[in-house]
């Protein structure tokens, strides 16, 4: 298995784990039913902001650890640059990722337009953000294994 | 995934050029080893620029390295 394939799998697993652990942590802090609108918006706002921050830091740390382990186990250095194949796969991953996020965004707007609870809109947005992240990693893994 | 119609003789040519490694060829043409692996497996059709760089690395015209469809050089 190549560096890029291992990296895609690591990113995928770490994205799922970070999201699951963070959701479990925040679920415990979920306010009671019937909370004020301002409180609800503040809760979801902080949910997204902290998740973004935690994800970025965790991904950087995991990436560094991954590179160290890769060097130790294979004796090879990780590729220092992205060539045309990497960029092409990156573009395809971004395309699929954005497509899924836009779909989720539109679904969230539908939930607003059809008088669904505000919480549902935020849940759809967060879920589509997570799924788009996962889709990006899966797309990369697929193209590195099967070709472009 | 549709099978690539552009094939190549890179593996054979590497062998004929003092058993050049994938990494050596990758360094010569400015790509990662993974891209050479994908090319040899037929999983990727290179850009025209990369095809020219590979042909310069082997000192051969492009048509002696790459072929479209069935390989008729045998």
Image (cartoon, rainbow, N blue to C red):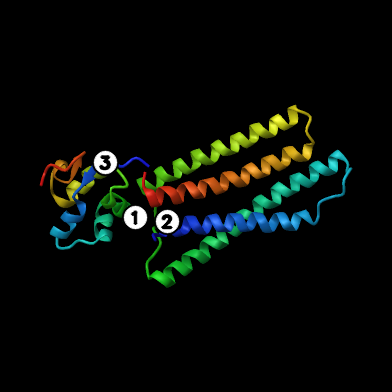
Residue A58 at x, y = what percent? 60, 59
Whether callout 3 and callout 2 share a subunit is answered no
> Is label 1 in a helix, a strand or a loop?
helix
Whether callout 1 and callout 2 share a subunit is answered no
The CA distance from mark 1 to mark 2 is 8 Å
Tags 1 and 2 in contact by the CB under 8 Å rule?
yes
Q: Which mark is residue A4?
A: 2
Q: Which mark is residue B49?
A: 3
Residue ID for mark 1? B34
Judge from the rendering whether residue B54 lies leftward or rightward of residue A47; answer left or right.
left
Protein chain holding label 3: B
Quarter of the image that includes the C terminus of chain A:
top left
The quadrant holding residue A117 is top right
Q: Residue at image x 39%, y 53%? A: A81
> In this picture, is A8 found above or below A85?
below
Tags 1 and 3 in contact by the CB under 8 Å rule?
no
The CA distance from mark 1 to mark 3 is 18 Å
Give whichever of discs 1 and 3 has the lower sequence position: 1
Q: Residue at image x 31%, y 42%? A: B3
């Amino acid at each position: 298995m190549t560096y890029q394939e291992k990296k895609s799998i690591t990113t995928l697993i770490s994205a799922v784990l970070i999201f699951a652990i963070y959701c479990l942590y925040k679920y415990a802090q979920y306010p009671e039913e019937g909370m004020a609108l301002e409180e609800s918006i503040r809760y979801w706002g902080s949910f997204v902001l902290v998740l973004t921050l935690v994800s970025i830091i965790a991904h950087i740390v995991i990436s560094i650890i991954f590179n160290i382990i890769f060097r130790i186990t294979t004796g090879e250095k990780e590729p220092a640059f992205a060539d045309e194949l990497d960029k092409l796969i990156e573009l395809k991953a971004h395309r699929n990722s954005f497509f899924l996020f836009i779909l989720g965004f539109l679904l969230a707007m539908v939930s607003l337009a059809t008088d669904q609870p505000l919480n549902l809109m935020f849940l759809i947005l967060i879920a589509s953000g997570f799924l788009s992240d996962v889709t990006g990693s899966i797309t990369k893994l697929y193209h590195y294994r099967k070709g472009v | 995934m549709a099978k690539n119609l552009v094939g190549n003789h890179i593996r054979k040519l590497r062998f004929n050029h003092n058993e050049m490694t994938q990494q050596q060829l990758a360094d010569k043409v400015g790509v990662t080893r993974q891209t050479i692996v994908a090319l040899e497996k037929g999983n990727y059709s290179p850009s025209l620029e990369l095809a020219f760089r590979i042909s310069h690395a082997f000192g051969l015209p492009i048509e002696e390295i790459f072929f479209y469809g069935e390989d008729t050089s045998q």
